[in-house]
Image (spheres, rainbow, N blue to C red):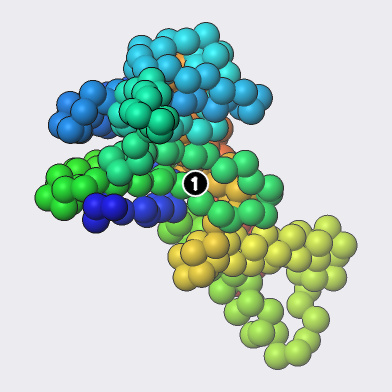
Amino acid sequence: MKITHGVDEYFHKNFILTEDGLKEFSKTLENAAQRFPAPAEVLYTVLTSDFRYFETARIEDVLHDPDAQEKGILQLSMEADFVEDLPRIEGDVIHKGTRDNWNIRLMFSLRRRGFWDAAQDKITLKVTSEERKWAYDYIDRFEEQIYKLQPGNRTPVMLLWLFVIPLFLLIYAYLTQHGQNPTWLEGAISRYTYYAITLFSTLMALGGMAVSIFKFNPQGMRILFGPMSGFLWGVGMEEYELFEKFRHSVLWVIGIIFLAIVFASAAIAI
């Protein structure tokens, strides 16, 4: 057995794969297939949101097949491999036409997450070759393209941290009463308003802390603030555009709530 070289690595990251991005990866994969020591081909496998899949050798099918256009894509696999030869008989020995010592596989996977699941999406790269330079050359090319993939849009985490301001004002207003029951806590409406504003500000500040310090960004937070991964063609593009509109709406609502809470907390503190 000849020595082989390659890589088998995973990239846990948010990604946006557009038509142009897919074609760029496909072009590199096609170039690699042409440099195999025997006839090779590129195959694409698309797993849709109903967990059915189709396989094709044409990138046009990946982009324009009805399943790819009308259903969300969960996983896209791109693989360069030898064209399988028919079994042949040499003497009394049957030789199967498969070879595993040259191969490139690139896979993009979207995870289906629960509300509190913070697992990231995944990109898989596997390269195998008998030629060290060939393998390392394409590993570098694909890694560069993967690192260049743009993440989904995200609302700035600073928006969550801003709620520390009204939280500080509310705590300051309470502590400066020197243990006395403040007048603005005597009425039921004002008391519950104070508690609601304090709780909301605390939750928002904790959310900013979770994302910035502990890198905890569950699916519920992603839905509200991003980022979301996606394959941006067909229904995938429509879903991503709807998510972006929703994210912008949430941004405006949270911004308005922040201003109202700041003015309310400032009035209480004064």
The reply to whether residue 266 is visible in this rendering is no
- The quadrant holding residue 86 is top left
Residue 130 percent location from the top left of the image: 21, 48
Residue that appears at 30% across and 44% down: 101
Residue 85 percent location from the top left of the image: 34, 23
Residue 156 percent location from the top left of the image: 42, 52
Q: Residue furthest bottom?
A: 178
Amino acid tagged 1: Asp
- The quadrant holding residue 98 is top left
Q: Nearer the viewer, residue 261 or 42?
A: 42
Q: Nearer the viewer, residue 190 or 76?
A: 76
SS at badge 1: loop
Residue that appears at 12% across and 50% down: 133
Q: Nearer the viewer, residue 262 or 120?
A: 120
Q: In this figure, which residue is indicated by the disc labeled 1?
A: 121
25 w.r.t. 217: above or below = above
Q: Nearer the viewer, residue 27 or 238?
A: 27
Q: Is residue 260 left or right of residue 179?
A: left
Residue that appears at 55% across and 66% down: 210
